[in-house]
Image (spheres, helix red, strand yellow):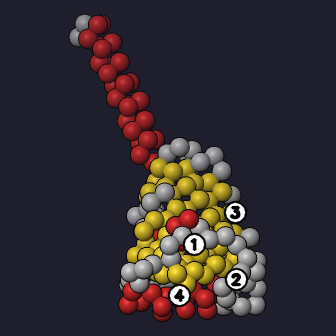
Amino acid sequence: MPKPVRVLIGIGLMLALVAGGLGILGSQAGDWGVPYFSFTTENGTTCTNTWIGHTCDDVTLADFEQWADLQVPEGTTLLSASYTKTNADFEVVAELRTDPEHAKEFGELLKEKYGKCQDAGYRPEELADHDEVCLVNSVLARGTQDAPLTRRWLLSTGVAKDGTRLTLLTFASR
């Protein structure tokens, strides 16, 4: 074989090896925790690594229930949820809507688990035209909740004119 053909074959093999290595690196980098690469959780949430953790912008219901430690009851839909993990800290932010048939029951469950409604706090803009607004802050709820105080939470919930309940939740590590 002439030398130019052998050189081209050698260059082609080297390029194939480098491309294969980069392909493997690109497909596995997210699972390895490489910053700015994505990975998918067991429950289907796609997350992106950061330098000190990861963020998940479109959280599945199963991951929300696991990370928030809240079983979403029948008649309730997870409208949006995000999860941010940095070192040992985390934050889950979610918006849920409950149908009129289950709205009262879910409101009572929230009060029982996370504490009585409080006078302190501000009404989120999303609840501006809602009735029966309940604001709960874990710092002020001490002694009125069933949930352990190993995390912080802010909870805002209210009933819309059509009877549906809108709930805004934020959970964070202590």
Can you say whether 14 is above or below 154 in the image? above
Look at 34% across and 19% down and name the residue there.
Answer: 10
Horizontal side of 2 relative to 99 (left or right) equals left
Say which quadrant the C terminus sits in.
bottom right
First in sequence: mark 2 or mark 4? 4
Can you see residue 146?
yes
Q: Mark 3 = which residue?
A: 88
Labelled pair 3, 2 in contact (Cβ < 8 Å):
no
Disc 4 on helix, strand or loop? helix
Q: Mark 4 and mark 1: span between their CA atoms?
A: 13 Å
Mark 2 or mark 4, whichever is nearer to me: 2
- Residue 102 point in image, percent of width and height: 42, 89
Q: For the residues marked 2 and 4, what is the alpha-carbon distance in whole angstroms?
A: 14 Å
Left or right, 91 with respect to 166, comes to right
Residue 112, given in percent of the width and then of the height, sits at 61, 92
Q: Residues within 10 Å of mark 2 (few under 14, many from 20)?
A: few
Mark 4: which amino acid?
Answer: Gly
Alpha carbons under labels 1 and 2: distance apart: 15 Å
Label whose residue precedes the other's in the sequence (4 or 1): 4
> Which residue is tagged 2?
118
Q: Pointer 3 and pointer 4: residues touching (CB < 8 Å)?
A: no
Numbered tag placed on residue 50 in the rendering: none
Which residue carries the number 1 mark? 169
Q: CA distance from mark 1 to mark 3?
A: 20 Å
